[in-house]
Image (cartoon, rainbow, N blue to C red):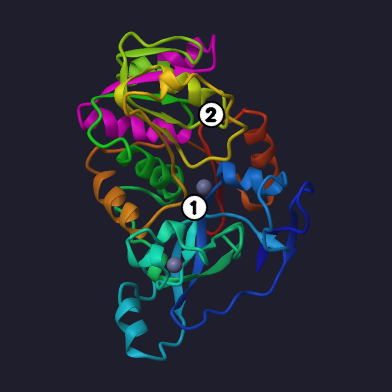
Amino acid sequence: MRAMVLDKPAHPLQLRDVSKPRPGRGQLLVRVSACAVCRTDLHVVDDQLPNPKLPLILGHEIVGRVEEIGKQANSKFEIRNSKFQIGDRVGIPWLGWTDDNCAYCRSGRENLCDRARFTGYTIDGGYAEYTVADARYCFHLPDRYTDVEVAPLLCAGLIGYRSYRKTGDAWRLGIYGFGNAAHLIAQIALYEGRDLFVFTRPGDVATQNDAKKLGAVWAGGSDEMPSEKLDAAIIFASVGPLVPAALHALAKGGIVVCGGIHMSDIPSFPYADLWEERIITSVANLTRRDGEEFFALAPRVPVQTKMETFALEEANTALNRFRAGELKGTAVLTITG
Ligand SMILES: [Zn+2]
Ligand SMILES: [Zn+2]
């Protein structure tokens, strides 16, 4: 099969003919139709994440069809595998495997599992014609979306949703960095009646206008203070200095959520900004429950995605344009029809 392979970080992916993977027990062999490109893919390529599997097939926002189901050797797997049949459409996310057994997994926090494996990072992903995935971590996807439309929801949507849920019932919600994840989550926040405040790069009036058009009550630069204090802020930009900026914009008891991205160092800030029960937290990975909730909610809003499509062999172009900030929506590789 054709695959785009990362041999070494800081080098372009190579188009290569590799052998088609075989599904093990409890795994699905999936013919990939679309795979979205995530910022994390860039971090892996740019050598900003430690110890990727090498050589590696990137991609963790995978949509495809089940072509084969690995041998079901015991009844436990049989029950779990019955979730999918040959021909089913399936979504494969970042969380690819956990041990189901550690203190984190047993307390509903499988996203923190010490032994977790991640699609397109520590196991091969979807920049290829086929991939295998543990059926327990795969999702059924809402019918309302095409393969290309739904692919970006599998990471930006899920991790964005987990970040959003961390804000509880915060009424006045700020979002710093209005990229793909923010655009998806803003739609859910508005659907749920929150007041939305959007922070962009200083001077990015075009994005501020987009945010207002979507329904934000206020949009401005990240160096500005919002028109009201916020009950919560989610940061989707990889800029550490936004953490004290967001904290400073919070009302008492507010929360800053660092939305699942690799961030630069956070500068020091006055203790008074944390005082009065303000909270700073981060979001790491996702749980299956996040996915089930999100895919039930997204079609009701309905959450709309913006995409730009590329052929599999154009993956380097997609990554380069993403790095340069030249994409108008999420890049999606269209692989098999
Ligand atoms: Zn675990
Ligand atoms: Zn991702």
The answer to whether residue 66 is left or right of residue 254 is right
Q: Give the crowd class for mark 1: few <14, some 14-19, many >=20 residues within 10 Å.
A: many
Determine if the C-beta at disc 2 is less than 8 A from ligand 2.
no
Q: Position of residue 73 (x, y in %)?
A: 42, 91
Amino acid beneath label 1: Glu
Secondary structure of the residue carrying numbered label 1: loop
Comparing 141 with 103, the one in front is 103
Amino acid beneath label 2: Lys
In this view, 241 is above or below 303: above
Residue tagged 2: 328
Looking at the rendering, the stretch of residues picked out in magenta corresponds to 180-209
Residue drawn 74% across the image and 57% down it: 15
Q: Give the crowd class for mark 2: few <14, some 14-19, many >=20 residues within 10 Å.
A: few
In this view, 263 is above or below 316: above
The answer to whether residue 148 is left or right of residue 295 is right
Membership of 113 in magenta stretch? no
Membership of 182 in magenta stretch? yes
Determine if the C-beta at disc 1 is less than 8 A from ligand 2.
yes
Secondary structure of the residue carrying numbered label 2: loop
Q: Position of residue 146 (x, y in %)?
A: 38, 49
Residue drawn 31% across the image and 72% down it: 83
Q: Position of residue 132 (x, y in %)?
A: 53, 71
**Ligand 1 position by quadrant:** bottom left
Residue drawn 25% across the image and 29% down it: 170
The numbered dot on residue 61 is: 1
Q: Quadrant of residue 253?
A: top left
